[in-house]
Amino acid sequence: MKVVILAGGLGTRLSEETSARPKPMVEVGGRPMLWHIMHLYAAHGLNEFVLALGYKAEMVRSYFLSYHAVARDLTVHLANGKATTHDGEGREDWTIHLIDTGLETQTGGRLRKLREWIGKEPFCLTYGDGVSDVDIGKLIKFHQAHGKLATVTAVRPPARFGGLELKGDEVRAFTEKNQASEGWINGGFFVLDPKVLDYIAGDDVLWEKEPLERLAAEGQLRAFRHEGFWQPMDTLRDLRNLESLWASGSPPWKTWK
């Protein structure tokens, strides 16, 4: 099963970082967010990726073109320019299709432009700016079992603020806000039948609007509930939180060895 990753947006809410590089290339623990997301899928045996590029696409291409050499030890022979790589990191057995889907194209339009790369089999789809410990294997089995065209992973949004327990104007307690009280939202991590591409009219269509709304109205969209960790990288605060979790040595989304 192929994995499509939307990696072409401008990332304006994280402009401190995205003025210089595309959002999926912003690093957590010295690795681009894309690297983390791809490892989530590879841990479940999915190793063919289709990256929908746009903003600063050349930076993503350059990263993967040089990945084999940069991630491993090298011996460079200056007399002839040849380089020999040695054992080390960078052994990921991945196939990566890097497709420029346009600078101004919306999320649905990017997906539509990948029709020939997706083929006729069900595929996974996610965004290039969020991580989770969602069980991809269970997600796929859930999709296969219900037989509908689309599955979205439903998650709880991160609790951002502490709560106040008041009696009149007296603060009786200060509590951590319960994440479960936030309700369910679209966490990405979709499994889709290629027929969903017919629900996308053109480049200016947001995947999250008309296509998903129509799929829901027709009873073709099911939700896989994920109660575990999920964190987008929308703001500088989110980025710092992810960096802190990675530095702890036990980031909750690191399900691979």
Image (tube, rainbow, N blue to C red):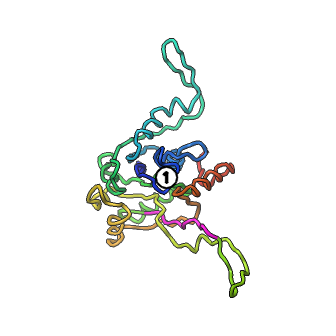
Q: Position of residue 194 (x, y in %)?
A: 32, 55
Residue 197 quadrant: bottom left
Q: Position of residue 10 (x, y in %)?
A: 42, 52
- Name the residue tied to disc 1: 15
Q: Residues within 10 Å of mark 1 (few under 14, many from 20)?
A: some
Q: Tell me if I can see residue 90 in this picture.
A: yes
Q: Main secondary structure of the magenta part?
A: loop
Residue at the spot 54% in from the left edge and 47% down from the top edge: 36
Image position of 3 (left or right of 74):
left
| Part of the protein shown in magenta | 152-161
Residue at the spot 61% in from the left edge and 45% down from the top edge: 29
Residue at the spot 49% in from the left edge and 17% down from the top edge: 81
Q: Residue furthest bottom?
A: 168
Q: Quadrant of the C terminus?
A: top right
Q: Tell me if I can see residue 45 in this picture.
A: no
Amino acid on which disc 1 is placed: Ser
94 and 33: which is toward the camera: 33
